[in-house]
Image (cartoon, rainbow, N blue to C red):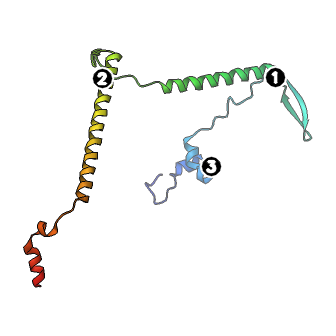
């Protein structure tokens, strides 16, 4: 009966025959999935119902019985909120923990020669040496400045410095 593949994407005739009451776009799905209509009834055990009129119709509604008072519910909500807040805080504390050290250093990795007293002595000695170096640099700068000023105020004989032949050529020209 099935003549092989066709150019259209329509399912073979056997599918069409099974899905008579189904719209054309759902025919293929209808053939693959069987609808289950059983076990969909409402569980009415242990519940109380009453008839009410809603918009002119008689409707069966379930009676809601109050299990907890509002104070109990508010207290429960408060405890849940506190628990949530504590959980958030503890999560934040866990996230702020430093990462574990992958490779620990040995105890004698940087051994201590002396204590803070010796460290202080070393720092004071370095400070004194630095102060002396600053003083020496200041003195050198002062001497260089004095030498420059002395050379600036010194009178120089130009003819003697440049030579007599320098000015002789200037007279001829």
Would you say residue 45 is visible in this rendering? no
Secondary structure under tag 2 reads: helix
The span from disc 3 to disc 2 (Cα, nearest Å) is 101 Å
Q: Earlier in the sequence, mark 2 or mark 1?
A: 1
Which residue is situated farthest in the bottom direction here? 173
Residue 120 location in percent, x, y?
A: 34, 21
Q: Is residue 99 left or right of residue 136?
A: right
Q: Which secondary structure, mark 1?
A: helix
Which residue is rendered at x = 53% and y = 24% of the image? 93
Residue 41 lies left or right of residue 53; in this view the side is: left
Q: Earlier in the sequence, mark 3 or mark 2?
A: 3
Circle on res. 20: 3
In primary-sequence order, the first of circles 3 and 1 is: 3
Q: Which mark is residue 70?
A: 1
Q: Is residue 163 left or right of residue 105?
A: left
- Work out which quarter of the rendered image holds the C terminus and state it: bottom left
- CA neighbours of label 1 inside 10 A, class few (<14), some (14 to 19), many (20+): few
Q: Is residue 103 left or right of residue 3?
A: left
Residue at 59% across, 38% down: 34
Secondary structure under the numbered disc 3 in the rendered image: loop
92 or 71, nearer to the observer: 92
Where residue 72 sits in the image (x, y, percent)? 78, 19
């Amino acid at each position: 009966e099935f003549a092989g593949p066709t150019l259209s994407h329509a399912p073979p005739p056997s599918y069409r025959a099974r899905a008579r009451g189904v719209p054309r776009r759902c025919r293929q799905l209808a053939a693959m999935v069987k609808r289950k209509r059983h076990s969909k009834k409402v569980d009415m055990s242990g519940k109380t119902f009453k008839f009410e009129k809603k918009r002119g119709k008689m409707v069966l509604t379930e009676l809601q019985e109050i299990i907890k008072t509002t104070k109990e519910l508010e207290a429960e909500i408060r405890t849940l909120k506190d628990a949530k807040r504590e959980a958030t805080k503890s999560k934040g504390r866990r996230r702020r923990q430093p990462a574990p050290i992958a490779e620990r250093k040995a105890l004698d990795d940087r051994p201590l020669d002396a204590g803070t007293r010796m460290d202080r002595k070393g720092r004071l000695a370095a400070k004194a040496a630095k102060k002396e170096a600053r003083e020496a640099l200041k003195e050198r700068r002062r001497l260089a400045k004095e030498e420059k000023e002395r050379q600036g105020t010194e009178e120089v004989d130009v003819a003697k410095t440049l030579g007599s032949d320098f000015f002789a050529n200037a007279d001829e020209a």
